Image (cartoon, rainbow, N blue to C red):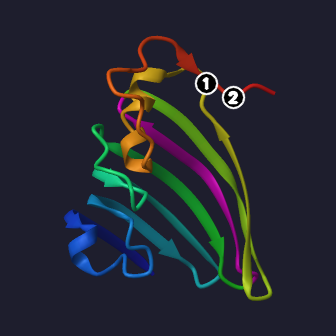
């Protein structure tokens, strides 16, 4: 099986797709493909989001976000591996990789996020989407954010 899918300008709040997560809103697009031999499904694509809102008290993000990925999913064992998960928030970039596996009625997910030298000004554009407000008149400028071990 081979399949291609392209979605442009999907309004999450107006579509009804987010009934179980009513805080989620924004305009998304997706372009990707999938292949399966009946045992392994290989999926790759790019998800884009504008005016993204992730929290009920949030407001639309001022920067677009994108997630470009490649994953393999074993249909028999119900396990998967995210080989490539490139996240972009404006000019800030991070990489997400990891695995998932069905464990009874739940899904066990193990992911690693690596985002070295991400510009703080770019990341701050996502704060409103998460319902985080800086004190009036303040802003985050300059510098980079990174994970410390």
Mark pair 2, 1: CA separation: 7 Å
Going 43% across and 38% down the picture, which residue do you hit?
88
Write down the region rendered in magenta. 77-90
Does residue 82 appear in the picture of this structure?
Answer: yes
Q: Is residue 43 above or below residue 122?
A: below
Q: Earlier in the sequence, mark 2 or mark 1?
A: 1
How far across and down, in percent of the image, does residue 143 sit? 51, 12
As for residue 79 lying within the magenta part, the answer is yes
State left or right for residue 45 relative to residue 77: left
**Viewer-proximal residue, 8 or 120?**
120
Q: Mark 2 falls on what kind of element? A: loop
Residue to which mark 2 is pinned: 147
Residue 147: name its quadrant. top right
Residue 16 or residue 60, whichever sits in front:
60
The answer to whether residue 49 is visible is no
Residue 72 percent across, percent down from the top left: 62, 65
**Tag 2 near tag 1, CB within 8 Å:** yes
Secondary structure beneath disc 1? Answer: loop
């Amino acid at each position: 099986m081979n399949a291609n899918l392209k979605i442009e300008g999907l309004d999450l709040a107006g579509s009804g797709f987010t009934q179980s997560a009513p805080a989620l809103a924004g305009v998304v697009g997706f372009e990707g493909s999938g292949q399966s031999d009946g045992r392994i499904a290989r999926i790759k694509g790019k998800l884009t989001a504008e005016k993204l809102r992730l929290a009920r008290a949030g407001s639309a993000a001022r920067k677009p976000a994108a997630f470009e990925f490649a994953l393999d999913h074993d249909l028999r064992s119900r396990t998967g591996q995210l080989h490539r998960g490139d996240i972009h928030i404006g000019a800030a970039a991070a990489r997400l990789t990891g695995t998932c596996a069905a464990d009874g009625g739940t899904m066990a997910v193990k992911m690693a996020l690596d985002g070295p030298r991400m510009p703080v000004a770019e990341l701050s554009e996502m704060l409103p989407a998460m319902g985080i407000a800086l004190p009036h008149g303040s802003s985050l400028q300059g510098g980079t954010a990174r994970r410390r071990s």
